[in-house]
Amino acid sequence: MKIAVASGKGGTGKTTISTNLALYLCEESNKVVYLDCDVEEPNGHLFLRPVLGEKITTSIPVPVIDSSKCNACGECVRFCEYKALVRLGKDVMLFPELCHGCGGCTLVCPNNAIQEQPREIGFVESGTSEKIGFVHGRLNIGEAMSPPLIRAVLRQTRSNDINIIDAPPGTSCPVIASIRDVDFIVLVTEPTPFGLNDLGLALDMVKVLGIPHGVVVNRAEDDNRDAEDFCEKQNVAILTKIQDDRRIAECYSKGEMILKGVPDVKKNFGELWNAIRKRVHA
């Protein structure tokens, strides 16, 4: 099973939910892999503290133009929808940071003046955290494109295990790359105007994808029903609510797992897992 944990905005507790869900499932004798796809700012390792082993460099193919063959016809420039190629007089200039590595420019060049070479964009590291498999990606500083690295992380999923995918925040291309092939999406929100507004955007996204989903309300308050009312209007299930608790904040600030520091929340992750299983196998 592949379960993505996502959110419409950053700071809702997405990594807290995903890392502790992985720990809960492991303690329940499941084989679990945690995959941190927030490659621009991975932080799952701060809590799971894995022993890392394998490191794989990830590259994308970018064009190399042979000026002796290029006559600046502009076919490659017209083909590139990402504006990575620009014609300047009798020369064609490449902006490698904009290149998506699709290879189309090499196919349309009538003079066979374009070849490709790999350009490193980041790396994938894997290891273990106790009995939890651990994988994360790190995008090189200054890189604009994370989906190729995210796909490299997702190639480390294991078909016989439960894969917990910690997606980037928001609703842009990196998020789509992380969640499009999962079995279930957990959307983490907080009962604030900003949190619920961005939850609405995330719900629109997952509904278009047609993937089963539900909501976890983090930092819930007994006297605040905004999240419940919002989810009722959106016709989406709340899988569990984690109360606003100073002990949880203290664990987070120390990089500790809340399942170990605040044992009360174990029931929340039990509710969450049971709700996911019920909806995936329905």
Image (cartoon, helix red, strand yellow):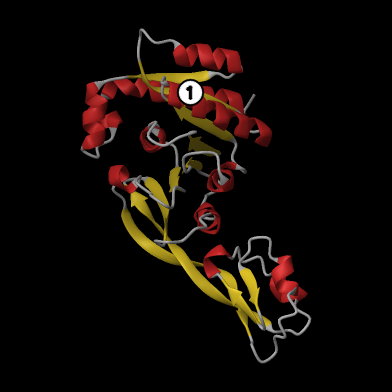
The residue lying toward the viewer, choosing from 126 and 191, is: 191
Query: How many numbered tags mark residues here?
Result: 1
Q: Is residue 87 above or below residue 223?
A: below
User: The residue under label 1 is which amino acid type?
Assistant: Leu
Give me the residue at 70% from left, 89% from top. 69
The location of residue 280, given as percent across then percent down, is 60, 29
* 166 relative position to 88: left or right: left
The residue to which callout 1 is attached is 196
Q: Give coordinates of residue 61: x percent, y percent.
A: 59, 71
Which residue is outermost to the bottom?
Answer: 68
Front residue (pair 117, 47)? 117
Q: Residue furthest top?
A: 223
From where the camera sits, is residue 63 visible? no
Q: Residue at x 61, y 33 (%)?
A: 206
Mark 1 lies on a secondary structure that is helix
Relative to 40, residue 279 above or below? above
Whole-percent x and y of residue 93?
60, 76
Circle 1 packing at 10 Å, graded few (<14), some (14-19), many (20+), is many
Relative to 250, is 178 on the left or the right? right
Residue drawn where x is 52% and y is 65% of the image: 97
- Decide: is 174 above or below 247: below
Q: Quadrant of the C terminus?
A: top right
Foreground: 220 or 109? 109
Q: Quadrant of residue 86?
A: bottom right
Image quadrant of residue 1? top right
Q: Classify residue 15 as left or right of residue 5.
A: left
